[in-house]
Amino acid sequence: MGKTYERIDGGLRRFIEEQPLFFTATAPLAGDGTVNLSPKGLKGSFVVLDELTVAYLDFAGSNAETVAHLRENGRITLMWCAFQGPPNIVRVHGRGEPVFRDDPRFGGLLAAFPGIDPAPHGLRAIIVVHAELVRDSCGYAVPRMVYEEDRDSHRRRFVREDDASLSAYFTGKEHIATSIDGLPGLPLPLPPSTV
């Protein structure tokens, strides 16, 4: 049955780093607010920074609910499922923050992602999560599925954008600067890219 871990290391760390897909869940403080659940992928866009800290690259998309919720209250859960090999589910419950492109920490954090070129994906922030509770569970009901490869659709869509056109794209979207529930989302105009 489920086990609680004091840190992300050893086999647990290997499991997390090997998964091609993970999920993020956040919610606003308001009881009637919209809960957000998002899939995340792209090889090299997730790293374990230390035994209690993980991070992932936040790329261009059609909303910014995770960013808005983290700016409001910091609560986040990350989840990985084993779709191949022995069944397993791992959840990291913690506090997260979006580190934006104009933050002095941004360049140092970005250096932790050598396995991906973020430039063609419209990088808008790095999400850093400090684990408060790390647990696994059986995952017996998770189906077996085969990972083939990352889609290239995201890169092909955003590779043609520069900082100005990316800011214009975000400004034209309804839920980038403001969340579905009216919370502050991604600060616009987007700060210039350092990559």
Image (cartoon, grey):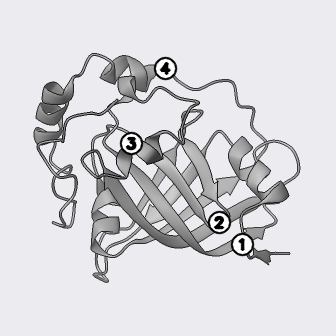
Numbered tag placed on residue 135 in the rendering: 1
Alpha carbon of mark 1 to alpha carbon of mark 2: how far? 5 Å
65 in relation to 149, above or below:
below
Q: Residues within 10 Å of mark 4 (few under 14, many from 20)?
A: few
* Mark 4 / mark 2, whichever is N-terminal: 2
* Mark 1 / mark 2, whichever is N-terminal: 2
Q: Residues within 10 Å of mark 3 (few under 14, many from 20)?
A: few
Question: Which residue is denoted by mark 3 in the rendering?
Answer: 107
Q: Secondary structure at mark 2?
A: strand
Alpha carbon of mark 3 to alpha carbon of mark 2: how far? 28 Å
**The image quarter in which residue 164 lies:** top left
Coordinates of residue 70 in the picture (x, y in percent): 35, 66
Question: Which residue is denoted by mark 4 in the rendering?
Answer: 152
Q: Name the amino acid type tagged 2.
A: Arg
Closer to the eye: label 3 or 2: 3
Q: Is residue 168 left or right of residue 127?
A: left
Q: Secondary structure at mark 1?
A: strand
User: Circles 4 and 3: CB distance less than 8 Å?
Assistant: no
Q: Is residue 73 left or right of residue 146?
A: left
Q: Name the amino acid type tagged 1.
A: Arg
**The image quarter in which residue 178 lies:** bottom left
User: Circles 3 and 2: CB distance less than 8 Å?
Assistant: no
Coordinates of residue 122 in the picture (x, y in percent): 32, 31
| Between 132 and 77, the one nearer to me in the picture | 132
* Mark 3 / mark 1, whichever is N-terminal: 3
| Between 82 and 95, the one nearer to me in the picture | 95
* Mark 4 / mark 3, whichever is N-terminal: 3
Residue at (22, 57) in percent of width and height: 185
Question: Which residue is denoted by mark 2 in the rendering?
Answer: 91
User: Circles 4 and 2: CB distance less than 8 Å?
Assistant: no
Q: Residues within 10 Å of mark 2 (few under 14, many from 20)?
A: many
14 in relation to 123, above or below:
below
